[in-house]
Image (cartoon, rainbow, N blue to C red):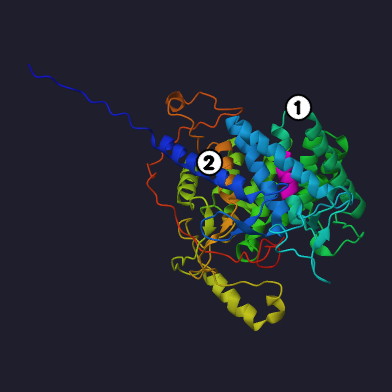
Amino acid sequence: MAVVILVVVVVPRPSVAHDRLLADKAAAYQEFFEAYHSPGPGGVVIVRFEDADFTEPNCYKSLGDSAFFTGLYLGAQAMRYEATGDEDALAEVRRIAEFMHQILEVTYTPGYIARYVGPDRMPFNCEALPIEGGSEHEPGENDYVGSFWLDDTSRDQYVGWFWGLTRAFDVLRPEEDAALRERIQDDFREVLAMFFETDWRIRDQNGRTRGTAYFIENFRRLSWLLQASHVTGDTEFRDRFDELWAMEKDSFFADVWAWPNKYVQYYGMNLLHLEFDAMLRLWPEGADAQFVYDTWLAAVRQYVAGTHNAWFDAVYLGGCERFGGCADADAVADDIVKGLTDFWDAPNWRRGITASELPLDPFSVWADEWLAEHPLFESLWDIDPQTLQAHEVADRCWDPFLWHRSPYHTAECDLTERKNRTAPGVDFLLAYWAAVDNGAIGTGDGIADDDDDTADDGPSDGDNDDDDDDDSGYEPGDGAPMDDEKSDDGDDGCGC
């Protein structure tokens, strides 16, 4: 009698394979970040090591944008805790929220936050040594004697500060974290009190407000008032929000129109996504909420769709979830998975790479030539030739925060390879946990949950059931670098 032996091979669904691969990558980024990229009181930094073995930091760099990127990391950790219930994530939320209070407190100026605060010694102050007549270095006073803080704060630092603390507030425990939650509420009140007194200008420790760069646009005011109303429950903020919206609604599209950012100051796309992540999530129910979403699609989303930006795509999926779904949600989720799979493995050291040559955007070529003949306009709009199509993640110039760099760059990338320089990985962690939060990927906590897609992995369910092709064999992609020799707070950085 013939004996037939059936061999049953259980193969994990592709989505599960991706979940596991990306969860492992996120864990590696988290481990390296906590070891090196948030030293002292907790601000996010780029690290220069003594050698390529990543053993001894000799300089903490890019402190000028620390408040901004620390806010992004804080929000990512809040989403991590919300998705997993991991107590380590909650501990990070608490630790970083304390730092965000310190950058307000250290200035001893109501409402004015510092770019960074840390011990006034190497390797913390290697970029910010006090020099006569030009340093942003300020010595700490009172409780901060022995520390220093960085002055000349911009609106961009406040964008990260508000966004991260709002996300953090939502996951802190009402009873156990009551004191910290109350402090966040009071800090929001203090900052907005300054803006109300100065007509939305930043006022420094010398009582100065310094020009249009410190003027906060109406759409940003709306976002901050909405977040403050949500966090504090104060009717004053909601009343001011309603009053401003009544004046702003007719010009809202023009205020947030992102087409210019495709060619000039691409980092503005990232700032818009932080503000819209808050607005799409917190906007009060009603017809105007749909109006805001529709405006977002027309004025912002169309200019970043298909650019392989996992963070921007995760914000888009969050809007889809609230406003009735999107026909391309599965394709966007697939692209997020591919982009994060191609993303460099941790640690994210500075890579020297040449991207592929792609056809150029005819408008950018024409504009570059025309502006060269009209230098007066070139000082306002500096447009360089760029590609017609966006590079995929595996074919991009490296950057310490990938998502705010234009994906339309030419093949020429800026930096030589230096393995002893590492970026914090906030870009990967932010995109990963936002994608989990908005359902593009799961947390990788187990195969059994995926059979019926009903189990809860934490305070919110990170499961999903999309059936991607199994691309888990991707090799990490290469990119090519930007200059991190100085803080990215000038025209060539994030504009902070």
Q: Is 482 part of what is drawn in magenta? A: no
Q: Earlier in the sequence, mark 2 or mark 1?
A: 2
- Residue at 39% from the left image edge and 49% from the top image edge: 474
Q: How many marks?
A: 2
Q: Quadrant of residue 128?
A: bottom right
- Overall secondary structure of the magenta section: helix
Task: Report how far apart the C-alphas of labels 2 and 1 lie in the structure.
Answer: 28 Å
Find residue 27 and name its label: 2
Find residue 174 and name its label: 1
- Residue at 18% from the left image edge and 22% from the top image edge: 5
Say which quadrant the N terminus sits in. top left
Q: Magenta segment range?
A: 160-166
The amino acid sitting under disc 1 is: Pro
Between residue 178 and residue 391, name the one nearer to us.
Answer: 178
- Residue at 80% from the left image edge and 46% from the top image edge: 102
Seen as rendered, the residue at the extreme top is 1
- Residue at 71% from the left image edge and 33% from the top image edge: 170
State the image coordinates of residue 264 (x, y, percent, origin top left).
64, 66
Q: Quadrant of residue 59?
A: bottom right
Horizontal side, residue 330 vs residue 228: left or right: left
The secondary structure type at the circle numbered 2 is: helix
Q: Is 163 part of what is drawn in magenta? A: yes
Residue 258 visible in the displayed image: no
State the image coordinates of residue 150 (x, y, percent, origin top left).
78, 58
Label 1: few (<14), some or many (≥20) within 10 Å?
A: few
Label 2: few (<14), some or many (≥20) within 10 Å?
A: few
CB atoms of marks 2 and 1 within 8 Å: no
Between residue 320 and residue 149, name the one nearer to us.
Answer: 149
